[in-house]
Amino acid sequence: MKKIEAIIQPFKLEPVKEALHALSVQGMTVTEVKGFGRQKGIREVYRGMEYQVDFLPKVKIEIVAPDDKVQVIIDAIVDKARTGRVGDGKIFVYPVAEVIRIRTGEIGEKAV
């Protein structure tokens, strides 16, 4: 099993969610986060004063999936989240040693 962690633009959450739902992804965690990458924030002017916005709003999606579904899920996220501009986000993939469903005690892929 793998944990897929995607950091994307907030306005891309709905298309990504619909694509993952179409793939029968059973569960995901979505968190509103702030950060910056290569774009290093932005400069904005408010009431005539210029200021630096260092951390930009993003959305983090976390999914645990069986190994055979990982690439399909990644492809769907990339397809729906890409705008072609700086700040589209990143996807990280981590190995998952174990999953335990607290309610039933199921272990492994059954718990996902």
Image (cartoon, grey):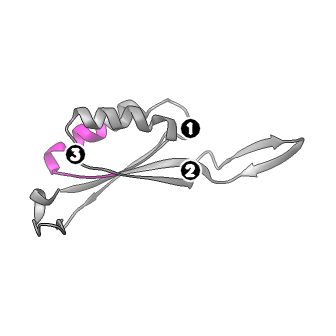
Residue at horizontal 9 percent and vertical 57 percent from the top = 110
Residue that numbered label 3 is attached to: 70
The verdict on residue 4 being magenta is no
Q: Amino acid at mark 2?
A: Gly
Is residue 74 found inside the magenta-colored segment of the image?
A: yes
**Which residues are the magenta region?**
62-75
Q: Residues within 10 Å of mark 1 (few under 14, many from 20)?
A: few
SS for tag 3? helix
* Magenta part, dominant SS: helix
Question: Residue 51's spot in the image, x, y percent?
Answer: 80, 49
Q: Which mark is residue 37?
A: 2
Which residue does the image show at 62% across and 45% down from the upper left?
39
Give whichever of discs 2 and 1 has the lower sequence position: 2
Whichever of labels 3 and 2 marks the residue nearer the N terminus, that label is 2
Q: Considering depth in this image, is 111 or 60 the residue closer to the camera?
A: 111
Give whichever of 46, 68 is nearer the camera.
46
Badge 2 vs badge 1, beta-carbon distance below 8 Å = yes
Q: Residues within 10 Å of mark 3 (few under 14, many from 20)?
A: some
Q: Which mark is residue 20?
A: none
Q: Position of residue 36 (x, y in %)?
A: 58, 51
